[in-house]
Image (cartoon, rainbow, N blue to C red):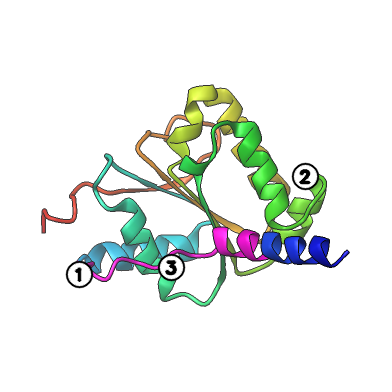
Amino acid sequence: ARVRSETLSQIDYFEKQSHKLPNPSAGFFGRKMEIDSLSDLIIKSRFVIVEGMGGMGKTQLLLQVLSSKEQSVMWFNIEKYSTLKDFKLAILMSVRATSFEEFIDSIDQKGTIVVLDGIETLLREGWDQVVDFLKTIIDHTREVNFIITSQINFSNSLIEPQIFKLEKGLDDN
């Protein structure tokens, strides 16, 4: 029984650590205008996509914005998941939910932000499945904010996000 409780403690620690806000880069500077614009957009909208080419600094910009906020953040690095099914299982485990309804109940609190970093990784399974899953989560919540980083344009999807388009890379001041 003792070994089992130690193992569960290690799993609890891993789950909490794996979905918390990562530390922003110490080498990040500038971009005050983008930080302010993205911060305002996050305040005004429940669903925001930070969009731009790979390597432009979407993740670091978002980390800078969120590190100054006091809301609870659940961060999912989508590249860690091989399939949409793996990701769905991970989000359930992140809050110890056994069903989608339990997951929604546990995250749908005012001030909670759920970040899906690198959503394009899941698109290999099909655009429709990923968009349907996102739409289902958004439609079943009322209080939680969602932020997605993506290299893919979502403007033609049915989920109608507010899009923050990152045009310049970190070195293009």
The residue stretch that appears in magenta: 13-30
Q: Residue at x 27, y 53 (%)?
A: 57
Q: CA distance from mark 3 to mark 1?
A: 15 Å
- The residue at which mark 2 appears reads as 100
Pointer 1 with pointer 2, Cβ within 8 A: no
Q: CA distance from mark 2 to mark 3?
A: 26 Å
Q: Is residue 160 left or right of residue 55?
A: right
Label 1 sits on what residue type? Answer: Phe
Tell me the crowding category of disc 2: few under 14, some 14 to 19, or many 20 or more residues within 10 angstroms, Cα based.
some
Q: Nearer the viewer, residue 166 or 23?
A: 23
Which numbered dot is residue 40?
none
Q: CA distance from mark 1 to mark 2?
A: 40 Å
Pointer 2 with pointer 3, Cβ within 8 A: no
Q: Is residue 61 left or right of residue 169?
A: right
- Label 2 element class: helix
> Is 70 covered by the magenta stretch?
no
Label 3 sits on what residue type? Answer: Leu
- The residue at which mark 3 appears reads as 66
- The residue at which mark 1 appears reads as 29
> Is 21 covered by the magenta stretch?
yes
Point out the tag, 2 or 3, that comes first from the N-terminus.
Answer: 3
Q: Quadrant of the N terminus?
A: bottom right
As displayed, is residue 92 above or below residue 120? below
As displayed, is residue 125 above or below residue 4? above
| Residue 144 at x, y percent in the picture | 63, 59
Q: Is residue 74 left or right of residue 44?
A: right
